[in-house]
Every structure is written in structure tokens, then in C-alpha cells.
Image (tube, helix red, strand yellow):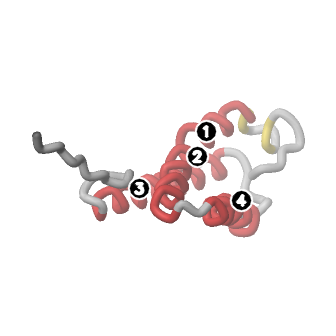
Amino acid sequence: MFFWGGTTSSGTLPLALYLFVLLFSILPAYRVLMVWVYDRTESLLLAILMHASLLASQLIIIPLSLVGVATVTLDLVFAAVLWAVVGVVALANHGHLTRQTTIRRRVA
């Protein structure tokens, strides 16, 4: 997935198309989850470990023989799962992904 032998993966899929799929499907959803975890825990280490786990899981789980359209399909399914997780997290937090601050009004 992350290693390419040239400008295409096995000559069937342009690298630009694959990067487009990554940049606009998987990475935004994962970024939302990483920011949510950091916002809740204020732990940079946890965000770093989350990022490392994404890279490691992609390298371990996805077979190297998977190329071309199959790779893009797998990535789109993974993106759909990530966006579903973002939706569940938002619903669990009453539609908010950020911490809710209370506004205190001064009584004059």
C-alpha cells in the first residue's frame, strides 16, 4: 500500500488516483478521531501511538499482493468504517466532537 515501484501500482492504477483516495477518504476520518482523542486526553503520546498503529496495521493487515483496484476498494471500505466510527463517537457525545465549555454569565 505505501510502497510503489513507479508511478503506478502494478501498472494498473495511477498513483495520483490512489493518493486522492487516501487524502480524501481515510486520512480526514482518522484525523478527526486523532484530534478527538487528543482533545479528550491531552496526551500527545496517545496521538502518536494512534498514528503509529494506523501505519503498522496497514503494513501488517493488507497483503502485499493486493494491488490496483482491489487496494482502492479496500481503502474505501476502511474509510467507510472510520467515518462510521466518527459518527458513533459524535452521537455518543450528543453530536459534538469537541469539549463543551460552559459559558458563565456575569450577573450585574
| x and y percentages locating residue 83 in the rendered image | 43, 53
The answer to whether any part of residue 96 appears in the image is yes
Distance between mark 4 and mark 2 Cα atoms: 11 Å
Quarter of the view holding residue 88: bottom left
Determine whether, in the image, residue 84 is placed left or right of residue 6.
left
Q: Which mark is residue 55?
A: 4
Amino acid type of the residue that numbered disc 2 sits on in the rendered structure = Leu
Distance between mark 1 and mark 3 Cα atoms: 17 Å
Q: Which mark is residue 11?
A: none
| x and y percentages locating residue 103 in the rendered image | 24, 47
Q: Earlier in the sequence, mark 2 or mark 3?
A: 2
Tell me if mark 4 has few (under 14), some (14-19) or many (20+) residues whose alpha carbon lies within 10 angstroms of its own.
few
Determine whether, in the image, residue 38 is placed left or right of residue 91.
right
The one nearer the camera, 48 or 101, is 101
Q: Which residue is under mark 1?
A: 23
Amino acid type of the residue that numbered disc 3 sits on in the rendered structure = Val
Q: Which mark is residue 27?
A: 2
Q: Earlier in the sequence, mark 4 or mark 2?
A: 2
Helix, strand or loop status at disc 2 = helix
Instruction: Give the position of the C terminus as an image quadrant.
Output: top left
Q: Which residue is under mark 3?
A: 86
Question: Which residue does the image show at 74% across and 52% down from the upper left?
Answer: 1
Quarter of the view holding residue 4: top right
Question: Which residue does the image show at 33% across and 56% down from the upper left?
Answer: 90
The single residue placed furthest to the front in the displayed view is 108
Of labels 1 and 3, the one closer to you: 3
| x and y percentages locating residue 30 in the rendered image | 54, 52
Question: Which residue does the image show at 25% across and 52% down from the upper left?
Answer: 102
Distance between mark 1 and mark 4 Cα atoms: 15 Å
